[in-house]
């Protein structure tokens, strides 16, 4: 099995909060056993394939649009299909064998 360039060991929850990673634009956590992933609003390129993800969330102010242009979520079949950002504006969205075959959708604004 290929290895990620970022080996997270046995961590199940990984949070890249804006306070700690204000300029993070690229992230590769592929082939880790991450269940929950939290991303900062600065993120543009994410590879999270083969991660056993259950949820992915952006720490995004209510009035701000995300900057993601590339998101690879392939082979995360248990991923919850409702996310807190608009996936329709992502240039490259890879979701093969993801979310039990359901399309990813943005949760309604509250």
Image (cartoon, grey):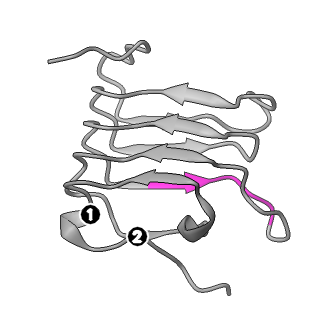
Would residue 24 be counted in the magenta stretch? no
In the image as oriented, which residue stretches furthest toward the front? 91
Q: Identify residue for label 2.
A: 104
19 left or right of 43?
A: right
- Residue depicted at 74% across the width and 57% down the height: 60
Structural crowding at the residue carrying mark 1, measured as other residues with C-alpha within 10 Å and reported as few (<14), some (14–19) or many (≥20): many
Quarter holding the C terminus is bottom right
What's the magenta region? 56-61
Compared with 16, 101 (above or below) is below
| Vertical comparison of 76 with 31: above or below | below
Q: In screen coordinates, is 97 left or right of 6?
A: left
Percent position of residue 1, x then y = 14, 18
Q: Residue at x 55, y 28 (%)?
A: 27
Describe the element under mark 1 as helix, strand or loop. Answer: helix
Residue in view at x 22 percent, y 46 percent: 75
Q: Position of residue 48 (x, y in %)?
A: 39, 37
Residue at label 1? 99
Q: Earlier in the sequence, mark 2 or mark 1?
A: 1
Question: How far from the left and from the top, in percent, is residue 21?
Answer: 74, 28
Q: How many marks?
A: 2
Residue occupying the far left of the picture: 1
């Amino acid at each position: 099995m290929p290895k990620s360039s970022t080996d997270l060991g046995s961590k199940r929850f990984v949070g890249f909060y804006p306070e700690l990673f204000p300029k993070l634009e690229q992230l590769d956590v592929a082939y880790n056993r991450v269940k929950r992933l939290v991303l900062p609003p600065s993120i543009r390129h994410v590879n999270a394939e083969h991660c056993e993800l259950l949820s992915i969330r952006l720490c995004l102010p209510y009035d701000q649009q995300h900057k993601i242009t590339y998101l690879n979520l392939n082979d995360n079949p248990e991923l919850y299909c409702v996310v807190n950002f608009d996936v329709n504006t992502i240039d490259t969205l890879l979701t093969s064998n993801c979310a039990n075959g359901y399309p990813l959708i943005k949760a309604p604004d509250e």
